[in-house]
Structures are given as structure tokens and as C-alpha cells.
Image (cartoon, rainbow, N blue to C red):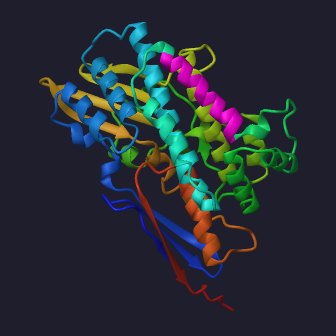
Amino acid sequence: MNTQAPAGDDPIRITATREGDRVTQVKVVIPARAWMGPQVVGMTPATAIAHLRAHASHSPRAHACALEQACAMALGEAPADLDSQIVTERALAAEMADAHLKRLLIDWPPHFGFEPRLNRFAEFHRQLITPSDPETAFALGGEVLDLVAREMLAGFFNQIRMPHGIGEFIDRLNAGGSLSSVMNGLIAMGASSPPAGGASTLLGTLSAEAWVSSVGPWPTADFVRQPTYAGAAAETGPLARHAPSPLVRLLLERGHRVSARLFAKAIDVADCASRMRHPFTDDVPPLLDAVRVDALVGMARVATSRGTLLCWVRIADGVIADCAMVPAGAWNFHPDGPFCREAVSGPAGGEDLEGARKRLTVLALALDPSIGHSLEIIDRPPAKKRG
């Protein structure tokens, strides 16, 4: 079967092969347009920043800010003043919250028989994408926090004691909240088998300087397309950021990895709202930082809703001579990354075609592809046993 992506440019193409009642192989092809670096080569920094703000396939503020900071470092410019950094931090947090809310309020509910909350999302979307003064950003952050606590996860905010098992967790879901209904459906699908080859490493938050120390002054083409950390593929995004949370950890320990990602996304929304209210608190790293690698070479790291975005820039004669940007999808849909490992780790008792389709669909959505994607499932007869 084939699940079509929305009309438009070339999507991420996922092809899964089933033999009998099991998915035995999966292949993911990400189109070149997911990597924005080559598009800005030959442009002046100002033109390139404006181009990404207008045309980035996802997280345009994050792309533009990463490029801006990498260029500033390459040119040896003085760091932005604190007030400007706070404006940027709030803008990036608002963009993250907006991307998460689109998934949580519009994209997830239809998969479990619920109507998308189009009007509710529109109310927040208009405000989150509009630049705002500190007072407005503070108030909007409070409204987003209320949305999470009173509408999405109400059952988890009206009791002090944390749930101690999946049964209690489900009881909290049943106590109310729009996201709770979706998570109930996910948990009802059952726990997943341990990922083939073990769970992917969770990519922690590293500074731009740490990335340069790990990768080197300029990334290889292989790293840009299929990045690794310490020699291994890794998962980036909300789960990596919030795996230590007791509720996320509970879901992971019980084999509900997709549910854990969805719950981590809700926590991320609350974190974004807190950043909009109080940027640069001591207990959270900044969303953006950059470092000068060499003369006319700069590197920036920025957190997005989907995970870490890395950007290296080389400038010559006043224009961008080279730019390497590594999007979160290159981590999460890596051939040995979380999607591919978990896609071939279906239920121990096997699954029918419709079950496989739904499992792979929600797995892909949980890992949040940056552009449209298609899913094709090919059925093959089980291999004959020798003997």
C-alpha cells in the first residue's frame, strides 16, 4: 500500500518490506531540499539570512538565526547585546511552540478518530509567529502554559503524586485533556518490542564549541547526510531533551516509545512557554550559540522542535563560499537511527498489514519529519526455511 504525502515538492519516501506478519526491512530516502546549506552559497550573508527566513522547509527562524550567528562568527563580529539575545531566544521558543502545537492539535488527533482543533491552533499560531515585545511574550507564554496544563494534560496537573505504573498513567489520561485521548489510543496499540540493535543513543545538548571539537572544523559530506556522534547514530528532539523526566522514563521503561515522544513533546511546549516568560534561566541551556572556527569560518548550533540543527559557514569575498547545515531529520531518519531501528521491531506476535501501516505512520509522525512524507509497504512471501 502507499500513503501519499501532500501535493508539492518531492517528499521523504519511506518504503517498508513485510514478509509474513513482520516488517523486515525499511528504507528512507530524504530529498536534497531538506538540506538548506547549498541554497545560500554565493549569496551575501544578509541575502542568505532573508532567503532562509522566507524559504526554509521548516523552522525558518531557527535556520535564519543559525546562519546569521555562524556568519557573524566567521566575520569576527562582536556578539549581540543581551537584549538582542533575549529577543532571539523568545522568537526561537515561540517558533518551537508553534511547530509542536500544529502537530499536537492538528496532525495527531485524526489518527485516533478525533477532530483536529483547527480554531484553537489558529488562535495561538497568529500570536506565536508575530514578533512581540517582552510584555506580550510573557503573557503569551502564560497562555501556552495554561493550554498544556488545563487542556492537553489536565489529568496530570490536578494531582501531586506522580503515577507509578502504566495503569495509573492511563487513569490520569482518562481524567481529561485533548492530548490524553490520543495517548490513550497509542498505549492501547500495545508496547513495542525492543528496537533492533538496541535503542538509539539520545543526543544530548552540546554547545557549538563542543560540536566543533567532536566533528572538526568542517563536517564531511557523509556527516552532513548521515550524522553520527561518537561513531553512532543518535536520536535528537523532545525525547532526547526530556528522557530524564519521570513520566517519560516510565513510558520508555514499559516499551511505549512513541507515547514517550509524544509526552516529551508536550513537556517541550511547556518549556518553550517558560523560555518566552523567563529567557536564559540558569537551569536550561540557550537555544542558540555559535563559535568562530577559523578565519572566515563560523559554526552555530540551534535547538528546534525536531531537534538539533547544526550550521557551518565559510565566507570569501563577502559572500557565502560554502554552507553545511545538518537538520534534525538526518539524525532521526538515519539508516541506523531510531525510525529505521524501531520500524523493524514490531509486536512480538506479529501484525497484519493495517497494524503495520498504523504503527509506521505514528512512528514517523512521532519523529516529526520536517517535510511531507510518503509510506509504501511492500508485501513479500515469507522466506522458505531450509531443511
Q: Is residue 263 left or right of residue 107?
A: right
**Residue 116 image position (x, y, % from top left):** 56, 53
What quarter of the picture does the C terminus occupy? bottom right
Q: Is residue 173 left or right of residue 70?
A: right
- Residue 211 visible within the image: no
Relative to 264, residue 141 above or below: above
Q: Which residues are magenta?
A: 136-152
**Residue 340 image position (x, y, % from top left):** 54, 59
**Residue 142 within the segment the image draws in magenta:** yes
- Residue 353 visible within the image: yes
Q: Quadrant of residue 63?
A: top left
Question: What residue is at 71 percent from the left and 44 percent from the top?
Answer: 177
**Residue 189 image position (x, y, % from top left):** 72, 63
Question: What residue is at 43 percent from the left and 36 percent from the top?
Answer: 309
List the single residue furthest toward the front: 119
As rendered, which of 182 and 346 lies closer to the eye?
182
Question: What residue is at 71 percent from the left and 74 percent from the top?
Answer: 350
Relative to 183, residue 45 above or below: above
As rendered, which of 122 and 347 lies closer to the eye?
122
**Secondary structure predominantly adopted by residues drawn in magenta:** helix
Q: Quadrant of residue 235?
A: top right
Q: Is residue 76 left or right of residue 101?
A: left
Question: What residue is at 65 percent from the left and 71 percent from the top?
Answer: 355
